Amino acid sequence: MERAGIPFKVLLKDVSEDYPADLKGYMVAEYIAQKKANAYDEEVELGETIVTADTIVVVDDVILGKPADSKSATDMLRQISGRKHDVITAVCIRNLNTITLFHEKTEVCFRELEFDEMTYYVEHYKPFDKAGGYGIQEWIGHIGITSIHGSYDNVVGFPVARLWAELLKLKSKLLL
């Protein structure tokens, strides 16, 4: 957001990322993004606009969350090695007048990774806060990703171009 010239301040609240078991794919990310936005009721009452997001990785209709430990991070890398998967980020924009909820999907393809590459990455980069157990901007992304179809920023974790477009729509509605 900073690189796009969007002024913001960061507020942190601890919000559970649990979701109902019957939700699938993008609905999970949207549910969690809206759940995070709802945690800021007090700030919305003060006239602030709140922007929250959640990113998930989906391979074969299975959601890969954030790995709990080295073993689960390596297991996730095994699941996406030599395959394509979707990275879905949902964003919720909330103010006193509106709630805008959207998601962006990017397809990512990894080459077949060697086990030593996976363990090296997990040991040195500790991707325990990253959906799918990897960061595209880190070493594993540079040596392992063969192609992406969609927004790079979305895979990093926040679809800035789409946010910009949605904020412009909101601004034009307010001017009417």
Image (cartoon, helix red, strand yellow):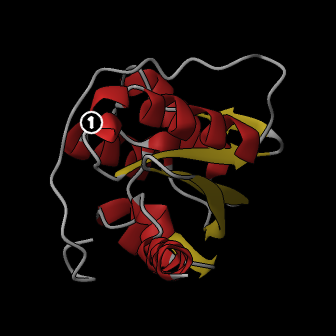
Question: In which quarter of the view is residue 5 placed?
Answer: bottom left
- Residue 158 visible from this viewpoint: yes
Determine whether the residue tagged by mark 1 lies in a helix, strand or loop: helix
Q: 167 above or below 175?
A: above
Numbered circles on residues, count: 1
Residue at point 83%, 41% (across, down) = 61
> Is the N terminus in the top left, top right, bottom left or bottom right quadrant?
bottom left
Q: Is residue 10 left or right of residue 95?
A: left
Residue 125 locus on image (x, y percent): 23, 46
Report the front residue among 97 and 15: 97
Q: Which residue is mark 1?
A: 43
- Residue 127 visible from this viewpoint: no
Report the front residue among 45 and 35: 45
Residue 29 locus on image (x, y percent): 62, 41
Q: 121 above or below 103?
A: above
Q: Amino acid at mark 1?
A: Glu
Residue at point 34%, 53% (across, down) = 49
Q: Is residue 107 left or right of residue 155?
A: right
Question: In which quarter of the view is residue 32 placed?
Answer: top right
Q: 120 above or below 102?
A: above
Q: Is residue 144 left or right of residue 105?
A: left
Residue at point 50%, 23% (across, down) = 17
Q: Is residue 46 left or right of residue 71?
A: left
